[in-house]
Amino acid sequence: MHKLNWKYILVFMIILCGGFLRFFKLSQYPIQLNHDEVSQLYDVESIVQTGKDIYGNFLPLAFPSTGDYKIGHYIYISTIPYLLFGNKEFIIRIPAAFFGTLTILAVFLFVKVLTKNWIIAILSAFLVSINPSEIFYSRKSFENVIGVCLDFFGLFCLMNNFLNNKGKIWGFFGIFLLSLAMYIYTTHTIIVPLILILFAYSFRKQIYPQKKHALFLFFTWIIFTVPLVVITLINSGLRFRATSVFISQDTNLGRLISLNGNTIKSYLDFVFLKFLNQTNPVYLFANGLDLTNQSIIGIGPLLFAQFPLVILGIIFIIKNKPFFYQGIFILGLIIISFIPSAITFEDYSPHRAMFAFTNLSILSGFGLYYLFLYLKKNTNVKIRWVGLFMIFFVLFLNFVYFLRIYIGSYPFEKSEKIEYPMKEISLYTWSQYNNFNSIILDPKFGKIEPIIGVGIHYYLAYYGNISPAIFQKQYKVGNKQRELLFDKFSIRKVYWPEDKNLKNTLIIVSPWSVPLADVDENLIIKRFYFYDGTLAFYAIKL
Amino acid sequence: MKINEELIIIFVIVLAFFVRLLPINFPIFSADDARIAARGGMLARNGEDELGRRFPLIFNSAEDYQLPATSYLTALGILIFGKNDLGARIPFIILGTLLVFLSYKIAKLFVKDKVICFYTLIITAFSPGLIYFSKFPNEFIISACLLLLLINFLMVKKLNIIVTSLIIFFMFLSTKILWFTTFPLILLFLFINTVLSKRDKIYLILFTLTLNILFVLSFINIPQGSRSLLENNLSSFNDLTIKNGIERLRSQVLSAWPTILDKILFNKIYVLIAGFSNWLQHFQFSTLFAQLDKNGEFGFLGVGAFPKITVVPFILGIFYLIRQKEDKIRYLLILTIILTSPLFFLFPKLRVEHLVVVMPILAIIISLGFINLNLKITGLILFFAIFEATVNLFFIKSNIKSSEAFRPFWINQLITDGYELSLTNNVAFSDNLTEDLIPHIQWLTPVNIKPMSLDLTYPYKFHQTELTHIKMVGESNNFYFCDDQIYSFIFSTKRELEKLGEKAVTIRLYKNDLGKEVATLSKINVCIN
């Protein structure tokens, strides 16, 4: 009993440590709300105050948001911290951080019930708690974090039913949670049915004696998911979101089809290539999170030190019969969870493969356990402790490296990716509100190449404290290129030869749209910089 | 039964030969292939290379020095079959086919089960990667062949000193990569082969080591030899992206973050991580089973080193190797690591061609994966593997299009026209029509090549810019009107076309393999400075 308590305390400490890494200075890192976060936050405010999104849609399932039709569950969940803590920037990050922390517990329970081994479960939970992708995505408002958490809890419940015979209600809960995950994020809509098939096949011997109950759960799952299918079919926003990210949008595929002249072969070759690309170790362990611009010097969804542990984990499950089928199940989950990334249009989409990264962390937990066993079997006490110290020191050093990249380099290297410095621009613009008749913002900006800022109207509205009800009335699409209008703001492309003749107008523009040399120095009243000090925008007073 | 077995092996090898032979003009030669083929023609004709050197041991190219084995082997083919595609490619097709048989033999040394060895035979015979590299002059298929031959001769009770020494000698003449791997390989096999006499072992160690040192020393004594090694074989130590990246990240100062920690986290040790990552990058599943070369220079479009379906037995083979307690088989993994270790030093270059030497070993691992599969599934996998390898041969046109940047087919017509015009006129070509046009001209036409008089015996990264009546026009060249040395026909890209102005009369337009107009033949009388 005494021993048992220590194990629970250890688990609690790991969760606490994971929670700390996810919640500590949540409003400061990342350095600014990105366009997704600010749009979700303002839509939360809009929903709470008016029941409608900023475009006036009543309780939508898919939010048009910045044109990407976000699935609405994260926004609805975020209304809870909004109501609890009030209108604060960080509240939009709370659900992800909360479920990200809960995932550690879910992983512990899942691995414990799967392997019946406390140590592997604790090690897996520990590695998940310090996993870069888990921390990175838990600190931004990302719904997939919730999905991953639900998947593990769902699997834990199913296993409690079929592997531990703890009662049929667990199975029902499991199916409920897995079905819920399907609603949360499209990735889970794809992988949950495959997970269920894998589960049914892997544990067929344990399921067979309860086949009637299993059939009942299957039909329950069908009932739970029918509304999702119907909603997806009838909701044009959801359909748009699904088709706009599908692999058919990939220009490389288009090129391959035009080269091959054979669509089926091209699709087969391309999907297979993309699928296998997801297992690229350099992407997984070296630079896949894309936090720097320094080629190989970056950080992957997993720590580099986890690479040997993953390999050892694979060797361990192959060599040890008692863990073979459990290990194969984990490998199966990893393979399945790479599928969504393989069938979408980006080369790599780590945000869609989070479930795979968590499972890889679990696999590295097996590897760490294997190392422990090796040290225990082959070394004396002194060497064992030195070995253990070395292992944890390397992991610690690698984790510190991740922190340094995440806190230090990421803002310097990638600030434009979170539309930095839009917050500063918004606050400045509002400070000048009374000095001008109209304010124009050109959304084209960037450091190395131009990108179009898609969330500027959200930044302006949120940081201007405009009531969503008022915004809904004022907001309209203008006639000019990319033009959005509300209040005295116009977000559009600036055409300098014409616009320079405007009067009593504040224009905020980047050098990509109007080169500095074209503007009289005296007209520039403020400059805005990216985090690394590169000029991002400047304000022209006309 | 034995006859049947042999018949089947012969049948597979004959099939392997034909899938390598047909179509004979595929893949289209890259500039380097054309250079080797043209050089082979010259060596076969009068024993001189393109620089007029008689039977040299080091050749030159646009990228690096080239070791002699490939050029002389090509010369042999051309000597027998003439200066044509068959002559230039047949030695490599034969070597590629021989490799299939050698892989079978090597599999027999490692695996007791004959059926597994037979699977290895099929996998290597229909490996798209090995098929591709058997179809054009290259050092990689030679080194793979010699390597398997060496392994075959090392796994014996009594060493055949002369043959083994010769193989090692030729290995050193084939590719620089083997200078890094042969000695560790010998050590490994002396470790595996416990029955070999101590005398033989000492001889092998001393012979290989001496030869290795001699080759390396001789090479670095060539002007620019050290530079060649540093740039082409040890680029990890030469790469600026790591150095600059470290400096940049260190410059992103955080308040309250100890500087010493930054020095611990960002330092030159990253070269090792980068090297290891580069090594791993070559072994990713997508390279092996989905797309061998993303640039399009090597390998079929949308196909890896092995057919897609073989990823399943490959994974099972790895499982088998890990579970296996028999040491000899487990050495396959160590062998793979040794043979690919030079990739560690090649960051940031992705050089999939260096995987050719381990493809037979990987084929054995794939075959081991069939051990735990029943005959029906094995048959199905092999059927799909052969099917995919064969289907590729029906998509030659797509392959030509996808690799047109490295292996341009469209220039054949342009070169033929240019050569005919050069018989009576001075002709100029833009030097950005393709990677390096002169080797293509030398290969595709009977142009009379006068050996260039050079101050240097071994010029490094050498580009030839002139042939009889033919001149390459670079970005720095300009056109002007004059009386002598007039160039009447210019094959130009957009760059030269703008320089020529409106006075040039367009005679013909040339489209590249993607159907895009990229070159113009113009008539104008100008001089070039």
Image: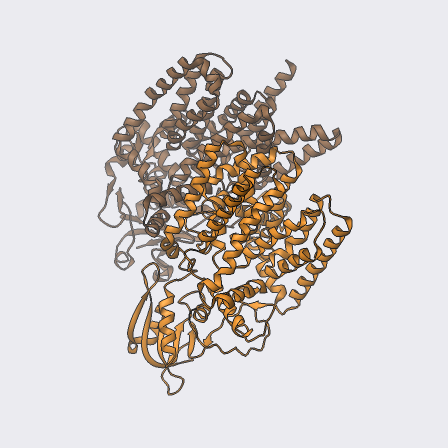
Chain colours: A brown, B orange
Q: Establish if B444 lies above or below A355.
A: below
The quarter of the picture where the C terminus of chain B appears is bottom left
Pick the front one: B236 or A127: B236
Please tell me which residue lies in front, A189 or B69.
B69
The reply to whether residue A347 is visible in this rendering is: no
Image position of A506 with respect to B33: above or below:
above
Q: Nearer the viewer, residue B388 or B99?
A: B99
Residue B142 visible from this viewpoint: yes
Image x and y of residue A534, in percent: 45, 53
Image-based side of A477 in relation to B87, left or right: left
Residue placed furthest toward the bottom: B483
Q: Quadrant for residue A9, please give it.
A: top right
Q: Which part of the image, by quadrant, shows the N terminus of chain B?
A: top right
Q: Position of residue A266 (x, y in %)?
A: 36, 45
Direction from residue B229 to residue B452 in the image, left or right: left
- Does residue A11 appear left or right of residue B307 in this picture? right
